[in-house]
Amino acid sequence: MADSGILWIDIIFDWAVIALVELARWLGITYEEINVWLFVIAWPIATFAMMVVILKLWQDKRMLVKTLSQMAAVFAVLAMSIAPQTASAGPSSEDMDYSVTRPLKVVTKVSNGIRFDVITPLAHTNVEGGQDSFWYTDELIVIRDLKTGKVLHAEHPASGNVTFVKSKKLSSDYVVIREWSGGASCCLIIHAYQTRPEFKKVLEHNNDFFDRTELVVGETTLELHKEPAINFGPSSHSQLKYNPAKFDLKTGKWD
């Protein structure tokens, strides 16, 4: 029997051997045969089956999350369609704190009668009382109908580093904005809007930390980083590899 010098190890080992011997006798096979059946055949099969089940559950979870997000988007569209016409289009410049004087930067772009205003605070500028301009969460994207002045859409970006993407390749029917949320590893957010024949937001995409200088690769096509459906890559964020994927602004679909 066991003679490792560690009492509890020897006790467990001896009981395991006795149990296997008795089970082999009850089944009418030898001790060697039951070891082969259990540890060479049954155990690897069970381990492989468990891995298949885990992978299937993981894929089912991803599909469920995607389905729920699509359902949420559908319900949001339905809610917007039945809401009163006076409903707010989101945060707007009217919601800003005007009680304190502070410097702001406004960058404007006009596309097909639609005006885009990107409002950000000037970097680390002290205001009255010694407070920093960044304390007021002034980061804002406001989109208006140039003729009527009506706010069509507004949202708060995650940071003050927001710029319009300039490209001669991009169709004049679209406006693309990129936003860098800062930090050592995250995150570049891409916003894309259609301005003709009707205004709508067609994309908001987390491009991770991949700061592509050439996002626009066609009149209605962007090249972005997209995580594969099944990713066995490194767990470390900094070791992720760029996975290019094409997004069609006109169809709203990934290639």
Image: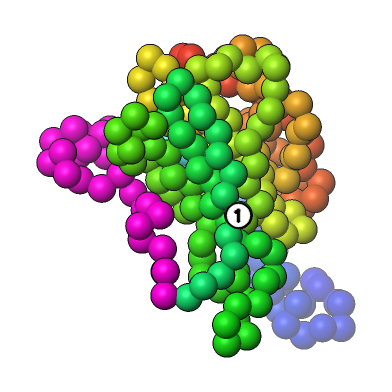
Q: Which residue is mark 1?
A: 105
x, y percent for residue 131 = 60, 81
Range covered by the magenta-colored residues: 70-99
Which residue appears at 37% of the width and 53% of the height? Answer: 91
The image shows residue 135, relative to residue 210, as above or below, that is: below
Quadrant where the C terminus is found in the figure:
top right
The image shows residue 121, relative to residue 250, as above or below, that is: below
Q: Nearer the viewer, residue 179 or 38?
A: 179
x, y percent for residue 82 = 13, 36
Q: For residue 234, which quarter of the picture? A: top right
The residue under label 1 is which amino acid type? Answer: Lys
Quadrant where the N terminus is found in the figure:
bottom right
Which residue appears at 42% of the width and 24% of the height? Answer: 113
Q: Nearer the viewer, residue 8 or 171?
A: 171
x, y percent for residue 34 = 66, 46
The image shows residue 135, relative to residue 52, as above or below, that is: below
Colour setting? rainbow
The secondary structure type at the circle numbered 1 is: strand
